[in-house]
Amino acid sequence: MTMTTDTPRDELVQQQAEPINALIRAVGTVVVGQEQMIRSLVIGLLTGGHVLLEGVPGLAKTLTVTTLADALHAKFARIQFTPDLLPADLIGTEIYNPKEASFTARKGPIFANIVLADEINRAPAKVQSALLEAMQERHATIGGETHALIPAGEPFLVLATQNPIEQEGTYPLPEAQVDRFMLKIKVGYPTAADERLIVDRMISTMEAPTVQAMMTLDELSAARRTVNEIYIDDKLKDYIVSLVQATRDPASAGVKWSMDMAKMIDFGASPRASLALARAARANAFLEGRGFVTPSDIKMIGMDVLRHRVMISYEAEAEGITSEDLVQEVFDRIAIP
């Protein structure tokens, strides 16, 4: 493995990663049994990638995001998505000032460093489209005038939660919007031991445990710069491309699949997935205190990057095969360099 002079030493990475890992541990004192979810959210922070959390109600999705925001010296906004929400409620609107006989822009809650879009799939398509524009362009248009969501150089991150599509009263997110999320995290039920610990901590009717702000935006920006310098070998870049290509054209992968992958996949992951997987692998290596990426980093975060980018066919649905099954098949069959 040949590293350049720009590759950060492990000592530097460990020094800068320690405050980030301390933040993860602090959030873990409030949110029990969701360590992987917390870690994935932090990877989103380190890479500037938006994150979608999916799970049934009551699994601390909202609590995790709000606790993470509390631990940062950043502007935070929470938007509760409902069927009667309008784009203006998200973006903002123009207000008439009778004294000056003019309109002024009143910015909406989207103008923040960290935006929690709670139950995003309960809002109609026009609101979801407004959020899509903001996520992609990092600016919003109010009354024909374009406004930057945050000052240049500051992080902007949308952390969205949703309930499973099969629940009543939900609007499936458009595929184009789902692809804008760097990671999709499936939130599961805690273990019996973790649930008992939750009861012990939260049974009191007094104020719930919280965290104090412990990291500034400048410190986060410094960590993000270090993540961008994490070394990733050309062979691992080829490995990432091979994984993503296998979801689009399984026949060209040159491996023996355990199922007819071509019939199981309607649409594979786009090149955006390759970029997301490389960036997320760098962030995972950073959290591990390494200045270089290993195949384990790619496998650790790969499911969160790819599960929402592989569209299954009717045949797969009829056989009870999920996108996670197909992504796991790709990771199992594509050889590690």
Image (cartoon, rainbow, N blue to C red):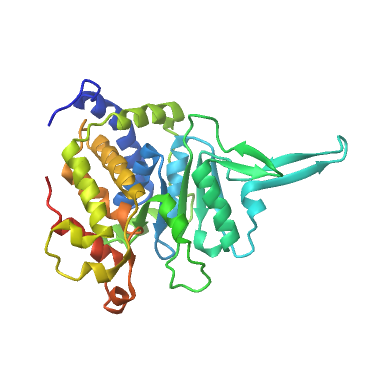
Question: Where residue 303 appears, x then y in whole percent?
Answer: 27, 55
User: Which residue reaches farthest top?
Assistant: 5
Q: Quadrant of the C terminus?
A: top left
> Is 49 placed above or below 263 here?
above
Number of marks drawn = 0
Image position of 38 (left or right of 83): left
Q: Nearer the viewer, residue 305 or 23?
A: 305
Is residue 82 shown to the viewer in this render? yes
Question: Where residue 82 appears, x then y in whole percent?
Answer: 59, 62
Q: Quadrant of the N terminus?
A: top left
Is residue 33 shown to the viewer in this render? no
Residue at 32% of width from left, 61% of height from top? Answer: 310
Image position of 268 (left or right of 7): right
Q: Nearer the viewer, residue 10 or 241?
A: 241
Q: Which of 151 and 202 is in front in this view?
A: 151
Q: Quadrant of residue 189?
A: bottom left
Residue at 44% of width from left, 45% of height from top? Answer: 67
Residue at 43% of width from left, 73% of height from top? Answer: 166
User: Which residue reaches farthest bottom?
Assistant: 318
Question: Where residue 101 appears, x then y in whole percent?
Answer: 87, 38
Image position of 201 (left or right of 15): right
Image position of 272 (left or right of 247): right
Question: Where residue 330 appears, x then y in whole percent?
Answer: 20, 59
> Is 18 placed above or below 211 here?
above
Residue at 55% of width from left, 45% of height from top? Answer: 77
